[in-house]
């Protein structure tokens, strides 16, 4: 479980393909402090550390085909950055919202506007997958906990302050950039329960 508060960005230093799996090698400032079997969020995707090279400050994670199909990790190239966050501890403040690290689907950035020192990003996603946003609700975009503004059927916007712009991969976004979305887990449960209730009413 994560909070959506990104610690820093990690850089891809090597990618190895192994049948349908991808092995990603990253470097970051705390790579030498990671342990094998530890969970780390990469652009909102929970991946397990499978190897650590403390001397080079690099670590290795593996993404299976299911993860590659549902996320933007398959688009990564050597030199790219990803948002990273280590899993929460019970004594950690929940400054963002509950993020599971299970990406629901991807979205495409369709607009970027700078407004008096902050940035507004608009994303479009496939609404046929059944996910929704609500105005002022929570959403995880590439692992960043954000508040939805201008919620529509298949689009929404988020506002980014300069600090978030600087420490996350948001500074690399432009129209056409593909991002990972994880919709609010509480909202997903409510949607599922209400949907089942309404379906039962229709059957009676």
Image: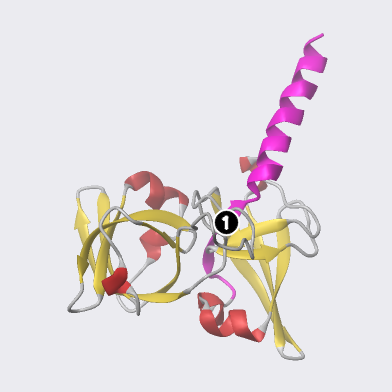
Location of residue 1 with respect to 108 vertically, above or below: above
**Quarter of the rendering containing residue 58:** bottom left
Question: Of all residues shown, which one is farthest toward the bottom?
Answer: 116
Rendering coords of residue 113 (x, y %): 71, 82
Rendering coords of residue 107 (x, y %): 58, 59
Question: Of all residues shown, which one is farthest toward the top?
Answer: 204
Location of residue 158 with respect to 38 vertically, above or below: below
Q: Nearer the viewer, residue 183 or 86?
A: 86
What scheme was used to colour the molecule?
secondary structure
Rendering coords of residue 155 (x, y %): 71, 59
Q: Residue at x 20, y 79 (%)?
A: 56
2 sits to left or right of 54:
right
**Quarter of the rendering containing residue 46:** bottom left
177 sits to left or right of 15:
right
Q: Residue at x 49, y 57 (%)?
A: 89
Q: Nearer the viewer, residue 195 or 87?
A: 87
Location of residue 116 with respect to 201 vertically, above or below: below
Find disc 1 in the rendering and name its residue. 181
Residue 198 among those drawn in magenta: yes
Q: Residue at x 21, y 57 (%)?
A: 17
Q: Nearer the viewer, residue 128 or 91?
A: 91
**Quarter occupied by the C terminus:** top right
Rendering coords of residue 199 (x, y %): 75, 20
Location of residue 139 with respect to 79 vertically, above or below: above
Provide the major secondary structure of the magenta segment. helix
Q: Which residues are magenta?
A: 175-204
**Quarter of the rendering containing residue 87:** bottom left
* Number of on-image labels: 1
Q: Residue at x 20, y 74 (%)?
A: 54
């Amino acid at each position: 479980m994560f909070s959506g508060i990104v610690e820093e960005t990690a850089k891809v230093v090597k990618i190895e393909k192994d049948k349908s799996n991808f092995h990603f090698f990253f470097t970051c400032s705390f790579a030498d402090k990671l342990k094998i079997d530890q969970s780390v969020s990469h652009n909102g995707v929970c991946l397990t550390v499978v190897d650590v090279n403390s001397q080079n400050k690099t670590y290795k994670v593996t993404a299976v085909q299911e993860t590659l199909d549902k996320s933007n990790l398959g688009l990564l190239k050597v030199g790219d950055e990803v948002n990273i966050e280590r899993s929460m501890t019970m004594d950690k403040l929940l400054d963002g919202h509950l993020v599971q690290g299970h990406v629901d689907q991807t979205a495409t950035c369709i607009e970027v506007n700078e407004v008096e020192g902050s940035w507004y990003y608009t994303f479009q996603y496939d609404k046929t997958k059944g996910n929704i946003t609500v105005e002022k609700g929570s959403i995880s975009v590439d692992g960043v906990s954000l508040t939805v503004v201008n919620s529509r059927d298949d689009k929404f916007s988020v506002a980014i302050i300069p600090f978030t712009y600087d420490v996350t991969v948001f500074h690399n976004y432009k129209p056409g950039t593909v991002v990972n979305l994880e919709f609010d887990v509480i909202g997903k449960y409510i949607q599922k329960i209400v949907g089942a209730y309404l379906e039962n009413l229709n059957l009676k």
